[in-house]
Amino acid sequence: MVKNTREWLDQMVVGLNLCPFSSSVIARDQVFFAVCDATTDAHLKQFYVDELQRLLGANAHDIATSLLMFTRGLEAFDDYLALLDWFQQLLEQADLTEHVQLASFHPQYQFEGVAADDLSHFTNRSPYPTIHLLRQDQMTKVLAHVSDPEKIYMDNIETLNNLGRRKVEALCPWGT
C-alpha cells in the first residue's frame, strides 16, 4: 500500500507537478504514511485522533505532512466522503482548523457538478482512499509566494488534458 502510494506521488503528484509544494517534503522524507485497516467508527476515529496527535506532536522537519490510507470499507466514494466530513467535524470540534487542514484523494474521486468522464477528477485520484493531513502554517507559508493559488488547479487540469486520456489512465489505472 505504501509502495503504491509512493509510486503515485512520484509519477503523478511530483512527476506531473500537480502539487508544486510536494517535491521538497517527499525528497526530504518528511511524509508520514499511516495505514488504517479499521472499519468500525470507534477504531476509525481513534486512528484519526492518533494520527492528528502524531503530526502535531512531531517536529515539522521530521513529519511535515501525513497521508492516512484506508485499506477497507471505503471503496464507495460516498462512504469515503462521509468519513471525510466526519473527520472535518472532529477537526473543527477540537479547534484544530488553524493548525491542520484536510485534502482528499480516492480512486474514484469525482468533483461535484463535473461530468463523470472529465479528466480533472484524476487530480485527486489515488490508489487508495487517502486523507492528507497538512500543517496549516506550512500551507500559509508556501501560498504566500503564490499570486493565484486557483491557477494551480487550472494548470493541473490543463496538464492532464494535454497528456490525454490514454496516458492519464495509464498513470492511474485504479481510477478508470
Image (tube, rainbow, N blue to C red):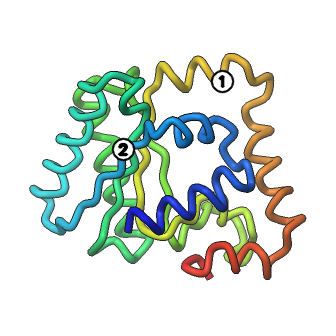
> Residue 174 has which mark?
none
Cα distance in 3D space between marks 2 and 1? 22 Å
Residue at the farthest right position:
162
* Circle number at residue 143: 1
Percent from the top left, x then y, of residue 60? 39, 24
Residue annotated with mark 2: 32
Quarter of the image where one finds residue 140 = top right
Q: Please, is residue 36 above or below residue 135 in the view?
A: below
- Dot 2 and dot 1 residues touching (CB under 8 Å): no
Query: In the drawing, does residue 153 fall left or right of residue 108?
Result: right
The percent coordinates of residue 51 (x first, y second) are 24, 42
- The single residue placed furthest to the front in the displayed view is 28
Q: Is residue 80 left or right of residue 165?
A: left
Residue 18's x, y, as percent?
70, 50
Quarter-wise, where is residue 63 in the image?
A: top left
Q: Is residue 42 left or right of residue 13?
A: left
For the N terminus, the quadrant is bottom left
Q: Looking at the picture, which amino acid does disc 1 mark?
A: Leu
For marks 2 and 1, the one nearer the N-term is 2
